[in-house]
Amino acid sequence: MDDTNPRGPAGPEPEGTGRQAEYDFFVSYHAKDHDWAKWVAWQLEDEKYRVLLQEWNFTPGTEWAASLRRDMTASERTIALVSETYLASAYEQRAWELAYQHDHGFARKLLPVRVEDCRLPGLLGDIKAFDLFDVADEAEASRLLLQWIVDAQTGRTKPTARPPFPGSTGTDPEQPGETSSRLLSPEALLTGTPLARMVEYPVRLRDKRAVELDLEHLRRACQRVIAERNVRAAVELDYLVAQNRPDVELSPDTYALVQRVKAEFRTEMRYMDGPQAQRRNLIEPLINLTNLVGAMFAHLPIEFVLHDTRDPLHSVCAVQNGFTGRQVGSPVSNVALSRIVNPPGAEAAVYQVRLPDGRRLRSATIPIYHRVFGLIALLCINVDAERFLPGAKGSKSLLETLARLPDNMVEEFFYG
């Protein structure tokens, strides 16, 4: 490997060494995960990062414990490839704890990467991790890993290129597991009843006031999904649990049943992306679309709320021009939950809503379906109709805002 680094110095001097870091990354891993370690290291070195990997850099006779601190301080950052075996190993724990001592999460010197679906305990669980195990396509996994590395180094996730217009027809963002689906399509695999249609659906509306995750119903749902070989419900259950992992992990019995579901359907899930990639491919383009449509009606009492229907406990993932009190991360409303449990047709439902303060809204709920996963989102549009009534206070200024034309002038020709 060429010792020159086209990226320049690895970064600031490691604490207490008085010199520049010799490596950009030290890859900490358990021997069981050495295939993951070599794959990650190869991706990084292909991008001209300097990588310290035990299997490649340590010659026979090297004493691991004595050289651990030296190797850590010789590297700008530590990538911890986390699995159940890694967490159980005392040596690997020393590696990530040493990196944490020099970091505390503020300088992003410890970068946990889960290569297996496992719980991140204690201090390790306080650091935002990245998942590699749930991405079906190798090229996509490599791209995401390298982007994540750049984000960790810069401390920001802003892309370097201008985001594409969500209405573009050039590429389809809703193609999870495209490479694998050539072998066996998700449509053919995803058979069975949607999780929300089961009587054991674990998302419950309590006293018409709060949405909660019912762990007893979740356990029953796991058992029924396994008994009936319900692939669709298993995938949706995996997604719901991934978004609400801390609540599920509070109950060891429930967590064990969830892991059993994943084990039972491992073959089917192998042909599609996991929860993290599904949200990225399915929901994030809809978030961009919601934000752009909302910008069209900025400063007007026309609210746009996007719901992720497969995570009702944190369903709100975009809010524009909000005035009903919803925020990103809020749970579903009773209306949205009823549409999840009893999915509507493809048409939008238009109805009247009365708020607690007496205001009446003109509202619409637009269901958004995916060819494989079915109902994935609801786009809710609320118009504070009373503010547009003739004679209503401020109605004239609202109409002027609506009629105001942007300074940016574009000539567009329509062809029939």
Image (tube, rainbow, N blue to C red):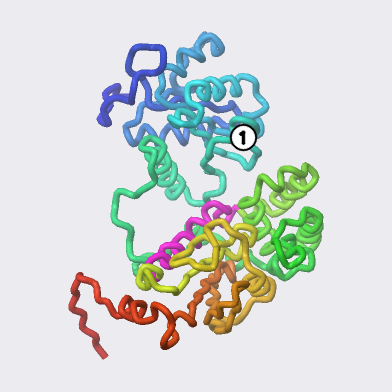
Q: Quadrant location of the C terminus? A: bottom left
Q: Quadrant of residue 5?
A: top left
Residue 66 picture location, percent across and down: 53, 9
Magenta range is 270-293
Total labels: the figure holds 1
Q: Nearer the viewer, residue 327 or 275?
A: 327
Q: Nearer the viewer, residue 122 or 200?
A: 122
Q: Quadrant location of the N terminus? A: top left
Q: Is residue 278 magenta?
A: yes
Residue at numbered disc 1: 83
Please give left or right for residue 53 compared with residue 416 in the image.
right
Q: Residue at x 76, y 60 (%)?
A: 225
Q: Residue at x 45, y 80 (%)?
A: 387
Up the image or down, 59 lies above or below 128; here it is above
Q: Residue at x 60, y 78 (%)?
A: 354
Please give left or right for residue 16 compared with residue 246 in the image.
left
Residue 254 picture location, percent across and down: 77, 48
Main structural element of the magenta stretch: helix, strand or loop? helix
Can residue 42 be seen?
Answer: yes
Q: Nearer the viewer, residue 364 or 356?
A: 356
Q: Nearer the viewer, residue 245 or 268?
A: 245
Please give left or right for residue 149 compared with residue 224 in the image.
left
Q: Is residue 139 magenta?
A: no
Can residue 371 be seen?
Answer: no
Residue 364 picture location, percent across and down: 53, 79
Q: Quadrant of residue 223?
A: bottom right
Q: Residue at x 58, y 83 (%)?
A: 352
* Kind of residue indicated by mark 1: Ser
Kindly state the secondary structure of the residue where label 1 is placed: loop
Up the image or down, 412 lies above or below 186; here it is below
Residue 24 picture location, percent across and down: 38, 26
Task: Check disc 1: other Cα within 10 Å, few if <14, some if 14-19, many if 20+.
Answer: many
